[in-house]
Image (cartoon, grey):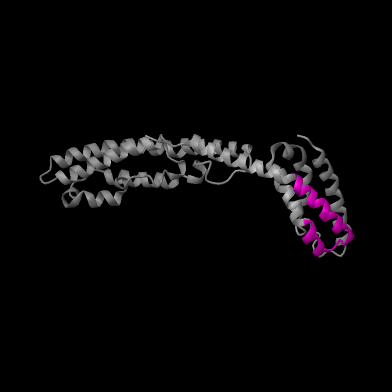
Amino acid sequence: MAGIRPSELQIKCPAELKNTHWQKAKGKVGKLIKTGLGAELKKLELLLKKIDMAKLDPASNPSRTLEELAKKVVAAKKEYVSKVEPLRKQLGIIQTKASEAEKKMKSTPMGNNAATAAAKVGKAAAIYAVTCKSLDMIGSVEKVKADIAKKNALAEKLLNGSLAKFVAGAKVFLADPSEASWGKNIKQQGRSISNSLAQLQNYRAKFWKGFEKFKGFDTGALKISKDPEFAKKSTFIVKKAIEQIKQIAAYKG
C-alpha cells in the first residue's frame, strides 16, 4: 500500500479498533461473552495517544536548515521505535484476541453477528499494522528539503538588497541617532540581514556568531531602549554592524 504522512497515523486508525465501536458492534449476545478484546482495544487507544505526531513527522513544523531537519529525522526515528513499534505489537495481540473471539461467538447460539464484528476487528488490526509500517518518512523529508531550498533561494536573492538598505538606513540614522530613527532606518533592515544569514548555511557558518550579537536589532534585547545614552550606544552598535556588513558584502562563499 502507498505510504502515508507520519502525522496522519492517528487519524488513519480504523473505527473498528475503537473499544466503543466494538462494544456496539458485538450486540447484546456478544456482551454476554467475555473475550478480553475490549481491554486490548483500550490498551491500543492509550498507546496511540502517547505518540507525538509532530515529532514523528519531520515535516510537521518548518525547518530553517538541513541541520535542523537532520535532528528532527533522528527524533522521528526514535519516536517510531519507542512508540509505534509497541503499537504494532499490540495490533498483533488484538488480531489473536479477535480470532479467538470470533470462534467463541460462532459457537454461541445467535452469535454470528458478534463473530462477524470480531472478524472485522481482526482484519482492521492487520491492515493498520501494515499502515504503521508504511509511513512515508522519505516523502516528509523531501518535502522539507524542497521548502529549505526555496527559502535558501529567497534568502540569497534578498541578501544583497538587504545589505544595501541597511547601509543607506545607517547613513540616515547616524545623522539622527534617535529611537524613532532606529525604528525607521535600522530595525527591519537589520532583521532582514539576520534572516538571510541565519538561513544560508555558508553565510551562517562564517558570520552568524558575530551578527547574532545585534539581537535582531531589537532595542529591548540590546538593552538600549529609553536609555539616556541611547544616541551614543546605538551609534556604536550601528558602526559595528556596518563593519560586519562590509565583510558580508565582500564574501563570495
| Res 92 seen here | yes
Q: Residue at x 47, y 45 (%)?
A: 53
Residue 237 vertical placement versus 156 (above, below) = below
Residue in front for this viewpoint, 19 or 235: 235
| Magenta segment, prevailing SS (helix, strand or loop) | helix
Figure label count: 0
Asked which quadrant contains residue 94, the reply is top left
Q: What quarter of the picture does the N terminus occupy?
A: top left
Q: Residue at x 80, y 52 (%)?
A: 166
Query: Residue 66's spot in the image, x, y percent?
Result: 62, 37
Magenta stretch containing residue 164, yes or no?
yes
Query: Residue 6's spot in the image, x, y percent?
Result: 46, 41
Residue in front for this viewpoint, 93 or 125: 125
Asked which quadrant contains residue 99, the reply is top left
Residues in magenta, as a range: 160-186
Q: Is residue 209 left or right of residue 27?
A: right
Q: Residue at x 79, y 58 (%)?
A: 185
Query: Residue 12's spot in the image, x, y percent?
Result: 38, 44
